[in-house]
């Protein structure tokens, strides 16, 4: 099983040791990133493994490999020699591993490693992404010596690069190795290290405020608590979350993984950031995913790739849930169920007859919202930046439309102000902080619903609250729609953890 390695990027040995204390018991080994140390600290490298009390990797990473080390190779050599030298006392621990790059061959250092029992990690880093096109060639560069551990850390330019890396890893001989897909698109390679057969997964002490040691690192606690890393093995079932690069901030992995745990399922739910729906499916298929959640901005883009769809998907024209079926993927829309349950709860009603609502947005989420409003008997005004999309949706659902600007003030205030729903992704964490409805003057009686749930309070919601309106965010909708996804994927009743 892959081990969890904490990369320490503190400026002093003491700082690194005190950060390590926060993670003791959670991580299996540590990597001392000596390139982040202040010059005076480098003298004390040798004492680190003994003081850390865990197996340690020594890495002095150069700038070109994504590190901070700028002095020449001579100085780097001296640092490594200092770290790998004789112990002062025989019992003092040595570095268990040292990282040497594929273009760094110094016989004296390699000899010292063999004498002191330090294993060499032979690495190649690529930050541009073209490394994924040369996997066999790079492997032969790092895998030359049988007693070394080959390591490839390669940026993924998109979800297909991760798929390529994963599929290629299955053809590798059975030996210790470290494989990392870097950057947001490589995120699943970290959580699924047991699927790529990587000896370890690198993490950073993000919760302790240390800088990320490389693009795409998570905090060890996230791996353990959100993704149940210790329980994911090569045979675990994978469920994927497909969306843009912001999906790594989604709260749905917490919901689904907690539910899998509660239900005793050997399964994991992992974000697969993807540039488009087809690339998402390619990466999910490479990981053998049984099902997936689909979110912004792929809810409509996924439609052409589905072999069958539920009635909701057909009427809404957007899909947020897929299930592997014979010969393809079947699409569902649980946003509809999620919004229906939560809006009725918010408004304390059993239906919406007589209610007049304004919906901002005309994307996939807006379609789900509008279909619920229509089915429950409400009237609605659709406002959108792109007028043609608002018009098309208004036609579909027999609603009214207008441009999303101050010219609609009177129409909203006088006719469609019982309920205001933000169905755009504006305000979402890691996305645009803009408010989609900033021109509207609230009267204070409007019920205001924001489908965004992270952050809990967006600028849109705060302005409505300040005007005295009753508001709610999309957290309840997410919980209800996630529970419905669980039912679709597993055929079982969702555990109560979804709504607790
Ligand atoms: P989703 O599937 O989550 O609904 P989407 O289909 O990409 O995502 O739709 C995003 C919605 O947010 C659209 O209504 C979009 O307006 P356009 O139709 O004009 O693109 C809206 N949106 C996104 N960014 C916006 C911005 N900066 N200002 C106003 N509206 C925006």
Image (cartoon, helix red, strand yellow):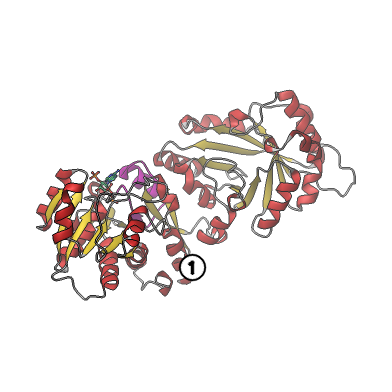
Compared with 152, 461 (above or below) is below
Q: Is residue 345 left or right of residue 56?
A: left
Q: Residue at x 70, y 26 (%)?
A: 105
Give the x, y percent position of residue 414: 14, 60
Q: Is residue 43 left or right of residue 299?
A: right
Where residue 352 sits, quadrant-wise, is: bottom left
Q: Magenta segment, which residues?
A: 273-298
Identify which residue, 51 or 330, lies in the foreground.
Answer: 51
How many marks overall?
1
Give the x, y percent position of residue 44: 81, 40
- Callout 1: SS: helix
Membership of 234 in magenta stretch: no
Label 1, residues with CA under 10 Å away: few <14, some 14-19, many ≥20 = some
Q: Residue at x 42, y 63 (%)?
A: 256
**Seen from this angle, which residue lies furthest right?**
89
Work out which quarter of the rendered image holds the N terminus and state it.
bottom right
Residue 494 visible in the current orientation: yes
Q: Which residue is under mark 1?
A: 261
Residue 310 visible in the current orientation: no
Compared with 137, 310 (above or below) is below
Q: Residue at x 33, y 56 (%)?
A: 463
Identify which residue, 136 or 284, lies in the foreground.
Answer: 284
Give the x, y percent position of residue 380: 15, 60
Q: Is residue 99 left or right of residue 291?
A: right
Q: Is mark 1 within 8 Å of ligand 1?
A: no
Work out which quarter of the rendered image holds the C terminus and state it.
bottom left
Give the x, y percent position of residue 107: 76, 27
Identify which residue, 272 or 366, lies in the foreground.
Answer: 366
Membership of 290 in magenta stretch: yes
């Amino acid at each position: 099983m892959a081990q969890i390695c904490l990369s320490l990027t503190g400026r002093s040995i003491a700082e690194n040791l005190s950060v390590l204390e926060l993670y003791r018991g959670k991580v299996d080994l540590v990597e001392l990133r000596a390139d982040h140390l202040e010059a005076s600290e480098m003298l004390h490298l040798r004492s680190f493994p003994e003081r850390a009390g865990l197996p340690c990797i020594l890495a002095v990473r150069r700038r070109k490999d994504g590190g901070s080390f700028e002095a020449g190779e001579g100085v780097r050599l001296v640092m490594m020699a200092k770290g790998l030298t004789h112990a002062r006392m025989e019992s003092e621990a040595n570095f268990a591993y040292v990282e040497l790059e594929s273009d760094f061959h110094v016989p004296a250092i390699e000899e010292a490693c063999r004498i002191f029992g330090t294993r060499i990690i032979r690495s190649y880093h690529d930050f541009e992404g073209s490394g994924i096109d040369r996997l066999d060639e790079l492997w032969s560069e790092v895998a030359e010596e049988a007693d070394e551990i080959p390591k490839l850390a390669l940026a993924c330019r998109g979800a297909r690069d991760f798929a390529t890396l994963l599929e290629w890893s299955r053809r590798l001989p059975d030996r210790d190795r470290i494989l990392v897909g870097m950057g947001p698109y490589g995120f699943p390679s970290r959580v699924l290290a047991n699927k790529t057969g990587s000896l370890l997964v690198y993490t950073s002490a993000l919760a302790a405020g240390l800088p990320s040691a490389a693009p795409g690192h998570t905090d060890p606690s996230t791996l353990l608590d959100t993704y149940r890393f210790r329980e994911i093995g090569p045979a675990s079932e994978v469920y994927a979350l497909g969306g843009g690069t912001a999906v790594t901030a989604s709260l749905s992995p917490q919901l689904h993984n907690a539910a899998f745990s509660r239900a005793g399922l050997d399964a994991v739910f992992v974000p697969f950031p993807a540039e488009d729906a087809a690339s998402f499916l390619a990466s999910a298929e490479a990981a053998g995913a049984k099902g997936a959640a689909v979110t912004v901005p792929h809810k409509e883009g996924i439609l052409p790739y589905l072999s069958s769809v539920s009635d909701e998907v057909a009427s809404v024209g957007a899909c947020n849930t897929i299930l592997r079926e014979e010969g393809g993927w079947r699409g569902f829309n649980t946003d509809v169920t999620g919004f229906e349950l939560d809006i009725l709860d918010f408004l304390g009603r059993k239906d919406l007859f007589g209610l007049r609502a304004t919906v901002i947005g005309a994307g996939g989420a807006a379609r789900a919202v509008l279909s619920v409003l229509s089915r429950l008997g409400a009237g609605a005004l659709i406002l959108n930046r792109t007028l043609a999309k608002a018009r098309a949706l208004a036609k579909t659902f027999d609603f009214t439309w207008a441009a999303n600007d101050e010219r609609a003030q009177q129409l909203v205030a006088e006719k469609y102000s019982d309920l205001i729903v933000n169905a755009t992704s504006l305000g979402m964490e890691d996305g645009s902080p803009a408010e989609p409805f900033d021109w509207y003057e609230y009267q204070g009686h409007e019920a205001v619903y924001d489908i965004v749930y992270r952050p809990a309070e967006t600028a849109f919601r705060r302005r409505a609250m300040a005007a005295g309106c009753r508001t709610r965010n999309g957290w309840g909708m997410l919980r209800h729609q996630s529970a419905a996804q669980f039912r679709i994927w597993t055929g079982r009743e969702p555990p109560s953890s979804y709504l607790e």
